[in-house]
Image (cartoon, rainbow, N blue to C red):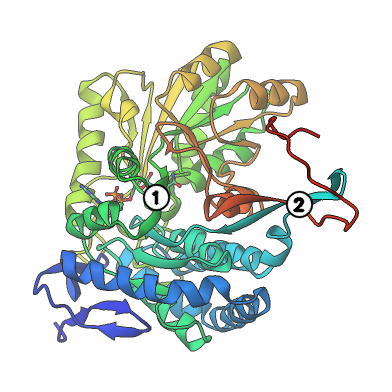
Amino acid sequence: MASQKTLGHWIGGKPVESASGTFGPVYDPTTGEQPTRVSLASVEEVDAAVAAAKGALASWSQSSLAKRTAFLFKYRELLDARRDEIAALITAEHGKVHSDALGEVARGMEILELACGIPEKLKGELSTQVSTRVDVASIRQPVGVVAGITPFNFPAMVPMWMFPLAIACGNTFVLKPSEKDPSASYRLAEIAAEAGLPDGVLNVVNGDKVAVDRLLTHPDVAAVSFVGSTPIAKYIQAEATANGKRVQALGGAKNHMMVLPDADLDHAADNAINAAYGSAGERCMAVSVVVAVGDTGDTLVSKIAERAAALRIGPGNDEASEMGPLITREHRDKVASYVKGAADEGAEVVVDGTGLTVPGHENGFFTGVSLLDKVRPGMAAYEDEIFGPVLCVVRAETYDEAITLINSSKWGNGTAIFTRDGGAARRFQLEVEAGMVGVNVPIPVPVGYHSFGGWKQSLFGDLHIYGNDGVQFFTRGKVITTRWPDPSDSAGINLGFPSN
Ligand code: NAD
């Protein structure tokens, strides 16, 4: 193996080598090798990153909107020219295929593009003459130093859901990316510096629980934006709010796709395949459960199975591959355990993709895709977020049975209905308990100018991420009541409560 690279931190606009002396492995999931090790920050290193962000805050938060947007437009230009480079970094550490990684970059850039228009979002409100010669203005101001803690599955997009909007609003930022695939995030910070972002406005501190815990308690961190698994999201919200911080914590999911008997089943099967197995199922908006209503089950399962058998699995940087490996060997083995356990619990294993090896990449973390039919609530494959290429099919007699099933789920991230019946689709969108709903759209990730977020165990906190909610999250309101008295006015003495 070629010599191993060490990834440090990006603090105060420059690379900072590890002082902690502790490192974590960063695998190439295609080969199973460890081309990189990532520095795991100590409390002191996190403090240095927060200090850099705090040091940059006074000047950045006061900088003109013109200056901030000049940077954002330049940054967008540089990233646009480097989509391929960022996508290649994602593929090298995450494993997803290059076209999928390019899609991730594009969806992240949507939020940067939203941020380029921040003056429109920060215009505020003004009411004149609310009382004689009294005006009232509502403005929004930055919250301060913001921490972002992100998951492995979108190492560029999820950080970009956060920091472009946060810094556009005048905050400074400390990003703690996933230690499993940190290089894309780091590169985003380097390119931001190249685009002219002042030192300290965006910092990247690599690390694990030690770094996260310090961010959650650091007195100079005002807000925490988190995306990751449900247990950690819950923990982050509890800890950070206990320490007086504003928090949005997005968690895991188990997204259901309901297929009604009138749906075009070929169209539904194509969409189920794409949404279940794209990015090897490592998407929080992956469809992991198809709810086949009425007599659709047998036909739908055979159509999905036929398509599953034809999928090409291989290295993400090979254009012929449609699906790459999983993130780690342990995760691959855990995913396999759900498939193995499903038969014992009474499900029908229609396609068993476990144990697949890709010639020339025998040590890579590959698995094939799996399809489980006749899955029922209570089975582990149904109850847990597997986060791999395993699609469960649950049979339901009626729409009512199907919606009751979906609404009984502990998660409520995304969901979809496939039908040609507008009335049923309308009922579904009003009745379903989830934050993002697709009608004949399997992965309804909102565009950048709407907000992304789930219900129930898929989100802890009040505000969704990016879009208008993102602007709200990264700013706090202030209301200013002004009177410029006319020389003829006399205030007089009046101890009553001010009224108009
Ligand atoms: P994860 O929760 O293991 O890790 C997320 C972040 O939390 C990482 O930066 C990690 O270092 C940190 N972390 C992990 N364990 C911690 C601990 N004990 N204490 C403090 N910090 C800790 O998630 P992951 O495996 O990297 O990502 C996959 C998960 O993220 C899935 O559950 C997926 O559904 C979810 N996800 C959700 C969304 C969403 O928008 N709702 C988007 C992407 C991913």
Q: Amino acid at mark 1?
A: Val
Residue in view at x 81 percent, y 57 percent: 484
Local secondary structure at mark 2: strand
Q: Classify residue 142 by image quadrant.
A: bottom right
User: Which one is in front in this view, the residue at disc 2 or the one at disc 1?
Assistant: 2
Which of these two is toward me, 225 or 343? 225
Identify the disc placed on residue 125.
2
Residue 70 pos. (x, y %): 64, 81
Q: CA distance from mark 2 to mark 1?
A: 31 Å
Residue 274 to residue 324: above or below: above
Residue in view at x 49 percent, y 78 percent: 84
Q: Amino acid at mark 2?
A: Glu
Does mark 1's beta carbon lie closer than 8 Å to ligand 1? yes
Name the residue carrying label 1: 227
Residue 289 located left or right of residue 93: right
Residue 318 to residue 231: above or below: below
Between disc 2 and disc 1, whose residue precedes? Answer: 2
